[in-house]
Image (cartoon, rainbow, N blue to C red):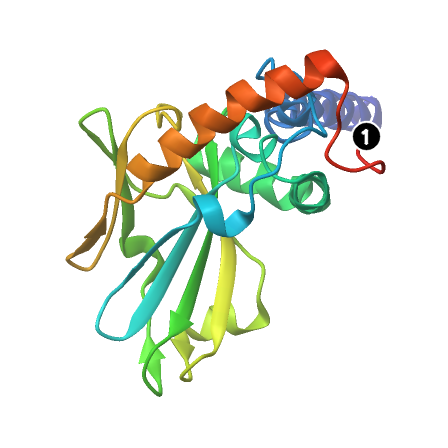
Amino acid sequence: MMECWKVGTIKRWSVGKIVILLSIIPTFQRSLAAQDTIPVGYGTLRRDDITIRFASPTVEIQVLPLDDQVIRLLAPDTYRSLAQLIRSRAGDLTDAAARGGAQNPTLMMVTFLGVVPQARFQPEELTITSRGRLFRPIGIVPLSPTWSSFQLDARQQAAALYLFEPGISVREELTVSYQGSTSDAWTRSVRLLDQERARVKARAQLGEKHDSGAP
């Protein structure tokens, strides 16, 4: 009887855990489907066009929003690369989202580059202000082996995927801050994205993809 109770308990626990995971996974797998009406394969923007760059005395910071309505406007090969990166890290992102208590987090790729030798960086001190609200990272998934040392040589870099609570609007102005340094560069990116969105819709109507290999 005791053994039957244990088996039943384990089965119920396993099913419950699976249900929780399935409620979180769609953020990273179905977000690539179609949050936006923008079709894939017609964008021409480069990552550099929409990457937020600014610096503190010791490191340069690069922030790239990974919202699907943003990356769909990038050139097809760049979109595919970023979409594959998100899919390849789906398990880690799901775990990070569960720990942070958010089912639909906002994703950003953040890169720190050393400006001086033995430059220290503090990942949790990067924040985003959107619609008057301050957002702090609720989860970080490292992409570089050097990330865990929190120290960089000059010109060395370390990248990670950041998770923030839902509510950051990539269609509006936002401010990125780190240790007293701030950047409002996204204002320019919003204009570029709006212009490219209109061009992409026009290309889609004409069936003119940017490259023949686009999905």
User: Where in the figure is residue 84, as x and y percent of width and height?
Assistant: 72, 43
User: In this image, 158 relative to 154: left or right?
Assistant: right
Residue 198 shows in this picture: yes
- Which x, y percent locates residue 19? 67, 19
- In the image, residue 151 above or below residue 178: below
The answer to whether 29 is drawn above or below residue 127 in the figure is above
Give me the residue at 69% from left, 21% from top. 33
Direction from residue 92 to residue 8 in the image, left or right: right
**Which sits in the foreground, 148 or 72?**
72
Is 26 displayed left or right of 193 in the figure? right
Tell me if mark 1 has few (under 14), some (14-19) or many (20+) residues whose alpha carbon lies within 10 angstroms of its own: few
Is 36 on the left or on the right of 1, as rendered? left
Residue matched to label 1: 215
Where residue 128 appears, as percent x and y from the top left, is 28, 40
The image quadrant of residue 30 is top right
Kindly indicate the quadrant of the structure image that contains residue 135.
top left
- Give the residue displayed 71% in from the left and 38% down from the top: 76
Q: Does the rendering let one see residue 140?
A: no
State the quadrant of the C terminus. Answer: top right
Asked where in the image residue 130 lies, by quadrant, the reply is top left
Residue at 18% across, 27% down: 132
Q: Which amino acid does label 1 sit on?
A: Pro
Quarter of the picture containing the N terminus is top right
